[in-house]
């Protein structure tokens, strides 16, 4: 059975949208975390907005570490009520996204990795379908914007799996569902 892993950039005040504010903190240490989680996955699960941004930005990119090749080659499952077709090795999930992700979890394979995709993530959280939360906590306060855990969100019991401060000031927070199996630590 696969795990659904969320990788989300978050400001100190909980904002997760339009993470252009993360760029000044990017370094090789952060890039290594990003590579590790991407290569531990064999598919991406994305909301429409994230998918459209990624599909515009990633094709044609290349790097020596193979990150771009992996990103472009992975199958993508897109939650959307409005898209009728998708390119970039993507398939639009039919019907209810929570049901489709639950079906994907039951299949053998590596992690199903979610980047961003706030609306989709909130749906999956309500159904307890996210096994691991990897929150990249950035030392910025934005004051407004979409939050991962909005007011009125259903309660969610998480257990701390790992905390890693990065030299850039970012803190990597890794949580699992309280009732999930023991998950391995990041391999560093």
Image (cartoon, grey):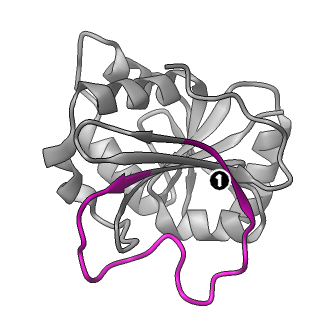
Q: Nearer the viewer, residue 69 or 95?
A: 69
Query: Who's the residue at 55% across and 31% down the image?
Result: 75
Residue located 29% across and 83% down the image: 144
Residue placed most toward the observer, 47 or 116: 116
**Residue to which mark 1 is pinned:** 93
Q: What secondary structure prevails in the magenta region?
A: loop
User: Does residue 173 appear in this view?
Assistant: yes
Label 1: which secondary element: loop
Q: Which residue is painted at 46% across and 60% down in the image? A: 48
Between residue 122 and residue 71, name the one nearer to us: 122
Spot occupied by residue 61 in the image (x, y as percentages of width and height): 22, 25
Q: Is residue 46 left or right of residue 24?
A: right
Say if the magenta span includes residue 10. Answer: no
Residue closer to the observer: 28 or 39: 28
Q: Magenta stretch?
A: 136-162
x 25%, y 36%: residue: 167
């Amino acid at each position: 059975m696969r795990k659904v892993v969320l990788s989300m950039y978050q400001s100190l005040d909980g904002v997760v949208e339009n993470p252009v504010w993360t760029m000044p903190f990017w370094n090789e240490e952060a890039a290594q975390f990003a590579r590790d989680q991407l290569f531990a996955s064999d598919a991406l699960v994305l909301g429409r907005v994230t998918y459209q941004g990624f599909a515009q930005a990633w094709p044609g990119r290349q790097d020596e570490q193979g990150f771009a090749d992996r990103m472009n080659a992975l199958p993508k499952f897109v939650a959307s009520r409005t898209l009728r077709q998708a390119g970039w090795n993507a398939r639009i999930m039919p019907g209810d996204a929570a049901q489709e992700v639950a079906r994907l979890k039951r299949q053998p394979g590596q992690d199903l990795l979610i980047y961003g995709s706030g609306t989709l993530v909130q749906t999956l959280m309500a159904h307890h379908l996210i096994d691991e939360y990897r929150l990249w906590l950035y030392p910025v306060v934005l004051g407004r914007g979409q939050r991962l855990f909005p007011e009125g969100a259903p309660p969610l019991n998480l257990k701390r799996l790992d905390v890693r401060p990065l030299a850039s000031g970012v803190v990597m927070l890794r949580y699992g569902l309280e009732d999930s199996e023991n998950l391995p630590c990041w391999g560093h």
